[in-house]
Image (spheres, grey):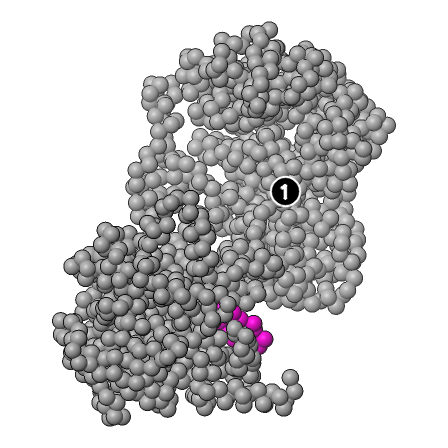
Amino acid sequence: MKLLTCPINGTRPLQEFTWGGEFREMPDPEQATDEEWADYVFNRSGAPGVKKEWWHHTASGVWFIAERDTERDIVLRTYLYTGKMSDD
Amino acid sequence: MRQSPIEHCFSQLPGDFGQVGDMRTFLRLADSQAESLNLETIGLADCSFLERTGLKGPLAMEFLSSLGLPVPQRPNHWEPLEGGGILMRLGMTEFFIEDGPSGGIARLISEKLGMDGIEGAYPVRRQDAALILCGTKQNDFLSQTCNVNFAEIDEKNRQVVMTNMVGVSVVMVQNKINERYSWKIWCDGTFGHYFWETLFGITLEMGGGAVGCNRLYPGLA
Amino acid sequence: MTDLSNQQAASNAALEKNRMARQDGEWIDRNQPLHFVFEGKTYSGFVGDTISSAIAASGNLFMGRSFKYHRPRGILSMSNHDINTMMQDDQDPTIRADVVLAQNGMQLRTVNTFGGLKSDRGRYMNCLSRFLPAGFYYKTFHTPKWLFPMWEKMFRTLTGLGKVNFETPRRYTAKRYAFADVLVIGSGPSGLSAALAAAKAGAQVVVVDENVRPGGSLTYDYGGMDESPALLGRLLSEVTACEKIEIWAGTLAAGYYSDNWIALVDDQRMTKMRAKTVVVASGSYEQPCVFRNNDLPGVMMASAAQRLLRRYAVRVGRNFVVLTSNSAGYRAALDMVSGGASVAAIVDMRPEGELSHWHELAAGLGIRILAGHCIYEAIPEPGRYGVSAAVVKRLSSAGEIEQAGGVTFSCDAILMAVGYAPAANLLYQAGTKMRYSHEIEQFVPDLLPESIFACGRVNGVYTLSSRLLDGERAGLEAAQKAGYVVEQKRVDVPAEPSGPTHPYPIISHPKGMNFVDFDEDLHLRDFYVSVQEAFDNIELMKRFTTVGMGPSQGKHSNMNAIRILARLKGKNIDEIGTTTARPFFHPVKLSHLAGKGFTPERLTPMHHRHQELGAVFMDAGNWKRPEYYQIEGLSRIEAIRQEVRSVRTNVGMIDVGTLGKIEIFGPDAVLFIERMYTGLFAKQAVGTTRYALGLDETGVVIDDGVVGRLAQEHFFVTTTTTGSAQIYREMNRWALLWKMNVGIVNATGYMAAMNLAGPKSRAVLAPHCNIDVSDASVPYLALRTCEIGGVSARIMRVGFVGELGYEIHVPSEKGAYVWDLLMQEGQKYGIQPFGVEAQRILRLEKGHIIVSQDTDGLTNPFDAACGWAVKMNKPFFIGQRSLKIAQATERKQVLAGFALAENYRGELPKESHLLIEAGDIAGRITSITDSEALGRVIGLCFVRPDLNEIGRMVQFRLSDGALVPAQIVATPFYDPDGMRQKV
């Protein structure tokens, strides 16, 4: 079973976590065309590569972001969401 | 009159109940020798009778400090309170307070916050099932029920562990209770029945069992 | 047993024909004799003996029959892949006699015979073998087709293994978690050396070994001298002195999973080990040589005979022929001589023979050594239950057998020492890339995963001194990777001069019976057939021949199969590749896997009250909820109807503590709720409640509930029972994303809740409530805080079931108290507790939807006829933008009420029965009930919009195809103006 590191609670087995889906930036609903909105709501890339995802530590309720390389099946890093859209 | 979430789990156990504060509590096993053995090997007690409360919010820490309470500076750590209670910091901005048998701090906080909370500090009315795990086989017991490496947790560090035990979310703290290192374990009271029955079954397999609260907090009633 | 007879038994056991005098380092306890029965005969042994070693001690090497041809078989490896000596007792159908310890009183049988070991009726299969090549059943028995079931039955019977006893008592095995800095798999010289190096660097080390004692090859490969036991003694005393090392003997590393999660299996249980780093020092499997009759009892791996000799003091023969291609064969010969046997010949397949001092030692004992020779065939003894001679022929340097000439050596045992295959199963599972080394004729790790290390034989290192160094290197690297500072500089491991493994230990013979796979009874010819039939890729060959698919999973057969295929295809071994090594490494008992399951269950604080009241519980998520309360003399339906009646005419109470309950505090609370739900809340007055409909981003209905405003910046929100955890989780995420200044508290567990409903509910509540509960003081949809029986409470005037009603929320610890109080008061008015089923009927009569019953994963609010609850003109709510698109498109279906004719007495349609219009599907039923209050059957259904007209006749199709007419009607069905709930 894989391990995941919660920024608050530390490294725990995957069964302590809930997956929250891919991290996506919501387009401005007022400005977006129907197609752009539908793309945001429905389309996800299944191609292997680095994914930015929401994860939730169930016992403590901590939400965080995990960057995962699905091609190599490793977690690159995890961090708390701070609000900056790109956090580098 | 409060009711322990797991009061019914004791209905078949030969022993004495007594009123502790405003809760009917299992005080002692009829067979005191067996109880001593449980206490030494692997014992489980219900200490839900202790008063507890919680709060969360961006100003929760300031509020607690303003009351002169020792506030843990690091997330997931705890500090002892007067009267045997503890103050736990769950994550960044949530706190969980449990009094000892003679406390009053939880009630004070509850009253100060009121039902609607104050600016930046909101009440969390905890109604947990509160268990105590004691005995020499604690590590073996935990290794069967919980996927956390407790060897890495030093009790002197006053760490709070939030994890999953037998499928239930729990808050755990290692603490000295009546001169014994024990684990205090809290879970949502609605899981309490399942939680107790499962853990109790494992203590039986390991040659231990239930312990009355009187052994951990002597002189309760 | 008395002392005297104990002594007698001990001396009996010691007198067994092939049991030798006490050996240094033996694993048996001569003070504890035991007896057991195998195939009707009583055998003696000692505690510590395996079943095979005790039987071998008696001089009997014939212990089983092969899978397909029922040929006599015996010991092969003594290392957990002797499938032909698998046995059974009444409980266990697959006892591996080579490694399972003998116990006093065991009653053992073979697994694959008909009428006993010797007179097995299946033995005639051997004579038919010419007609039974690999894959024969794919073609032979298919015509005529109708006969196939008969053949199938026959072959399933003939080829089965142990018999399962369905009366076996349930065994209960707990699992446990464990942690280590460094996990070392294998406790041979390299494993122990790795453990010591890692521990010296500071790491906590766990060493596991599947054998009951540590030491690996040091426990048996002596070469007639005492260097091995001396070294083992030194290593073990160092390990014992080291606090940081734990040795778990008798523990099998059964499988590798992600992030160094290793399943460790012992007698008692499975341990889920999580290690920071792993050192695989699992050694190698000695491989058989393929020659005619290499399966006779008495032909075995050299290491098997050495294990028997050193661990159990059992000598398997008096006169050996050793077939070899390495120094290990010479050491085995020396061991046999030191055990008092004679060695007729060492047959060395290498043209140059052995060049090390081992040759001198063997020659010095007068053993005849034939370099550049092979065993062409083994000659069975007259009964075919053992070996009587080895026919040895010259082998050219090109590997051709010279048919002319040859020598025949009389012998009663043949040892095979022609090389090894790495025990790399866990390395493969961990994702190691392996390459074939032509220098040592073995697959070795090429690219290891970051935290996995390999050393010793599995790493292609065979020289004993080098194995120690290789272990030290791996141990230091593992400790360093686990985070310990390693000061020592690199450890250099000298390259192996040559390997012990023969590149092609396969000798063809026109009469066959030269076995490659002893589990599946495959001889060389079967592989030729496979390639002829074009199954000439390793994965295809595996499936055609079933090589490696038996219980030993190819541990002794895969490598030779690869070599055969490579030669037949004229390819290199690397080009052939290997088959996939999946967990488990050895079979693991299902009882270990099943273990203890943990399925959490949630109970409300009033659960035991419901039990006392005769509740029949149902699952709702992980909650237990009363479906209905049993009443003596009433059927389920009658009881439910009575509960409904009681709410409509008097008063009833339902436990709704399972509803999600969320408190939202803070300056942004109202803005947050506006964004989470579709309705308008900005102007909601304190002390009121409003219906709340929650959507996902695609505009699909995912939850509904009530938003109550307790204070300007304090809301109390309820959600559905099953949605609560998800809604709370999602609320927290949105609050984070929107950076809102809110405090969100999950009150689901800490609030008990009950809905007191019915015309008399006010009368029940009033005497215990500290506030006036009249309609003027607490009107419909009001929210009040108050005390009930002294307990602080929140009451909401709700109308879900369509009567005057109060939803009461109190702290969980006082839930049962308040429930009791109201139930007691309610006695005066004929109160009845009601369950989920009655509530379903009551709400349906009101036309209220249940999210996820009357909606599905595609239903938006317009489809669900809940458009009234959606305020499209507010700035934002989750799902709004998608609804704008949905609003502009045509509805495919809408939710509508329907009723059957008042006099309808036929079979009741059910949920999901289809609405049929002109032969086409035009909708389906989502809820249906026979309503007593309305005197007819009513329900909700999805219907094509063009059919959604009040009064329109439609028809539903029953399971048997019959059509039932129904009419589209307006909802609510019952009390359409809601007068009953607003009193």
The percent coordinates of residue C530 (x first, y second) are: 26, 55
Q: Which residue is mark 1?
A: C602
- Residue at 33% across, 20% down: A35
Nearest the eye: C79 or A45: C79
Q: What is the span of residues highlighted in magenta in the rendered image?
A: C99-111
Exactly how many numbered labels are in the figure?
1
Give the residue type at disc 1: Arg
| Residue B176 located left or right of residue C352 | right
- Compared to residue C710, the image places residue B27 above or below, namely below
- Residue at 71% across, 37% down: C616
Q: Quadrant of the image for the N terminus of chain C? A: bottom right
- Residue at 73% across, 66% down: B34
The percent coordinates of residue B77 (x first, y second) are: 53, 52
The percent coordinates of residue C28 (x first, y second) are: 49, 82
Q: Is residue C106 magenta?
A: yes
In terms of image quadrants, where is residue C661? top right
User: What chain does mark 1 sit on?
Assistant: C
Q: Is residue C179 magenta?
A: no
Please identify the dominant SS of the magenta region.
Answer: loop
